[in-house]
């Protein structure tokens, strides 16, 4: 599984997926058939994350060929990323608290075994190695991985989210952080996601059977509340004449650079 680094190549992959494989998405998207068989999912997220292509043009190209009813799950998954971004932008303290939490969590022996893929859970160890070697995991597998990390290995969700961000090509501050919070049961309070042996067996095509997990764990308790913080639009001409581009923006042709007096590149420390 190889990822490309130019917009033209990304568009080729997008169009190829639309023409050949997207019809399988609704029924087979939750199956993880391994790194050598990803035709049931698009693997477009790294290109969307780094803005080689974007959510809106992807949706338009898909809907140009298929009615919404046939590709509804695919369109929904694309815009979950947009939703997460908007949610976090309006509650920025979730991110700052996550970063502060990391400073106070020690990397003990249990954590080190997990990130080295040396636990007693075969599927988890394989996923650790896949993540490190290919910088990608199937979306359903990410949920299973996070659940095992939190509820069976009993490791802090923050360190798991950090581990993903270190390795994923499509690592996104919003979707990654909030998805880990959701699995833990603190994004939607009281509702956690529990990996179960039957689920892993079914959706890995019986590759992993009889996985011993904690299937009765309760949600993580976090009493912090995050209030909605609406944007304060600064109408200063000086501010509005500056374009701030983040390091994951690999295709700046989307912007009319001549409109701005200053173009700034911002790096996020991970």
Image (cartoon, rainbow, N blue to C red):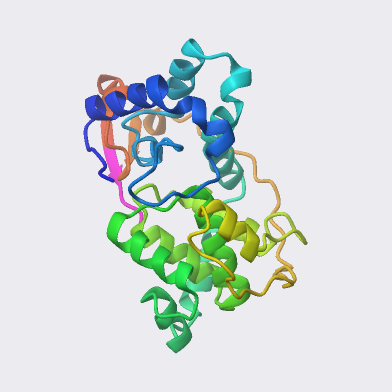
Point out the residue furthest to the top here: 64
What span is in magenta? 264-268
Expressed as whole percent of the image width and height from the top left, the position of residue 57 reads 42, 20
Extreme residue toward the bottom, this view: 109
- Among the 4 quarters of the image, the one containing residue 86: top right
Farthest-out residue, right: 190
Residue 120 placement, left or right of 230: left
Does 130 sit above or below residue 139?
below
Total residue callouts: 0
Dominant SS of magenta comes to: strand
Identify the residue at horizontal 37%, vertical 54% (top origin).
Answer: 168
Q: Residue at x 28, y 46 (%)?
A: 1
Residue 201 rendering spot, x and y as whole percentages:
57, 59
Question: Residue 123: within the magenta?
Answer: no
The front one of 267 and 33 is 33
Determine whether 70 is above or below 111 in the image: above
Can residue 261 be seen from the camera position used here? no
Q: Residue 118, how many percent across, how many down?
A: 40, 80
Q: For residue 265: magenta?
A: yes
Give residue 13's quadrant in the image.
Answer: top left
Relative to 162, does residue 243 appear above or below in the rendering? above
Task: Tell which of 125 and 223 is nearer to you.
Answer: 125
**Residue found 43% across the figure and 24% down from its top:** 58
Residue 30: image quadrant is top right
Say whether residue 65 is left or right of residue 270.
right
Q: Observer-nearest residue: 175 or 241?
A: 175
Q: Is residue 6 in view from this perspective? A: yes
| Image spot of residue 270 (x, y percent) | 37, 61
């Amino acid at each position: 599984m190889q990822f490309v680094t130019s917009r033209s190549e990304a568009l080729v992959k997008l169009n190829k997926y639309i023409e050949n494989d997207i019809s399988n998405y609704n029924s087979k998207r939750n199956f993880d058939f391994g790194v050598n068989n990803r035709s049931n999912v698009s693997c477009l997220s790294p290109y969307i994350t780094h803005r080689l292509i974007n959510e809106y043009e992807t949706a338009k190209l898909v809907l140009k060929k298929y009615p919404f009813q046939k590709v509804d799950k695919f369109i929904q998954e694309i815009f979950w990323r947009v939703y997460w971004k908007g949610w976090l932008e309006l509650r920025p303290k979730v991110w700052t608290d996550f970063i502060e939490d990391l400073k106070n969590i020690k990397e003990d022996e249990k954590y080190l075994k997990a990130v080295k893929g040396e636990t007693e859970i075969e599927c988890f160890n394989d996923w650790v190695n896949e993540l490190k070697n290919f910088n990608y995991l199937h979306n359903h597998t990410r949920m299973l991985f996070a659940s095992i990390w939190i509820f069976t290995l009993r490791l802090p969700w923050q360190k798991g989210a950090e581990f993903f961000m270190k390795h994923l090509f499509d690592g996104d501050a919003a979707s990654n952080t909030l998805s880990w919070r959701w699995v833990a049961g603190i994004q939607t309070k009281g509702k956690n996601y529990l990996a179960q042996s039957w689920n892993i067996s079914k959706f890995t095509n019986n590759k992993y059977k009889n996985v011993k997990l904690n299937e009765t764990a309760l949600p993580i308790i976090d009493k912090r509340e995050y209030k909605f913080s609406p944007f304060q639009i600064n109408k200063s001409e000086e501010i509005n004449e500056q374009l701030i581009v983040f390091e994951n923006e690999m295709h700046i042709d989307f912007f009319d650079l001549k409109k701005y007096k200053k173009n700034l590149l911002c790096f996020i420390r991970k």
